[in-house]
Image: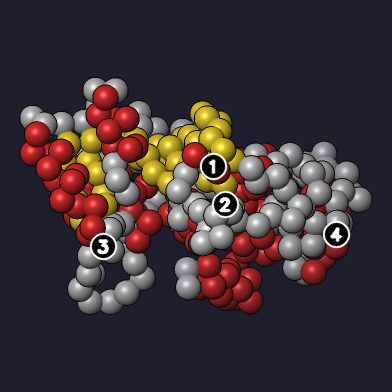
Amino acid sequence: GPGILTRTLLNAGVRVVALESNSAFLPNLQSLENSLDGQLKVIYGDFFRLDPLVTGTVKPPAMCSDKLFETMGVAAVPWRADVPVKIFGILPQKKERNTLWRLLFALYECSSIYRYGRAELNIFISEKEYQVLTAKPGEARAYQALSVLWQVGCEIQLLHTEPWSSFVTNLKNGGLAVPKSTWLPNDHLCLVRLTPQQNLFTGGLKPTNSATFIFMVKQCLAKPKSRLTDRLNSWSLDSGGKLLRELEIPKNAEARKLYPEDYRRLFEALQNSNMFTETWFHDEVLESIRNINL
């Protein structure tokens, strides 16, 4: 864009690497870059098109994260180390939900930007998606698989809310082009900080089995009012009731009533069963990943 966020960060005294996907805005940003003594570096690229699932040459503004991090001079650090880089941006509204899912997969698989450690995201998202990310068990419509997975994966902080009218979102008729939301409030854009949990990969959850965890949560919450025992039985798990008793989860508990940490505990318990090694389950996990990444 015109560089409002970039200038705000520069005024705070931080070193900024700015990605600009619209070539029309490049000249002004490059002029600003030349007027500063190395505090700003401008790159023609789109953060939300990092590491596209294509073969062959990647054409700008799409780009590869390894090239970007090399240009920034940011080296990979261990997962439990401090945050190696802070990223600021505005999620594209037309692909907001899809982008959140792709970032989520990258987080749990330690791929893309997360190959370099616990990259911190500071992003503007719509109020309705913020409500989903922070929803609590039992909140109708808001509490979803996305809620559970982001809450297990990251500390989520609301830094600021800004009315849609502050942004250039006018329609031809003069009205505001605010994304429609039937069930959740959506009057603002929310600046949200997503900091990956240091302890995400302690216990049974690993980058190598995280796709199974994501699939399990998605399957459980596909029908939020369904009983957890019914879902476990559908997976041919004969000892589902016993497993829930050991985890101190009520046998009649609905999927929508479980806290994010309960889902993590359930996953780690199921890791000790033979269910996740079943061929049919493995195939369904792969199909789920394929659908998200399309």
Q: Residues within 10 Å of mark 3 (few under 14, many from 20)?
A: some
Foreground residue, 77 or 167?
Answer: 167
Q: In the figure, 112 relative to 56: above or below?
A: above
Tell me which residue sits at (21%, 31%) in the image.
Answer: 15
Of the residues under marks 2 and 3, which one precedes in the sequence? 3
Q: In the figure, 137 relative to 279: above or below?
A: above
Of the residues under marks 2 and 1, which one precedes in the sequence? 1
Of the residues under marks 4 and 1, which one precedes in the sequence? 1
In front of the other: label 3 or label 1?
Answer: 1
Residue contact between numbered discs 2 and 3, judged by CB atoms under 8 Å: no
Q: Amino acid at mark 2?
A: Leu
Q: Which mark is residue 165?
A: 1
Residue 291, how many percent across, how many down? 54, 73
> Element at badge 1?
helix
Tell me which residue sits at (22%, 59%) in the image.
Answer: 23
> Element at badge 2?
loop
Of the residues under marks 2 and 4, which one precedes in the sequence? 2
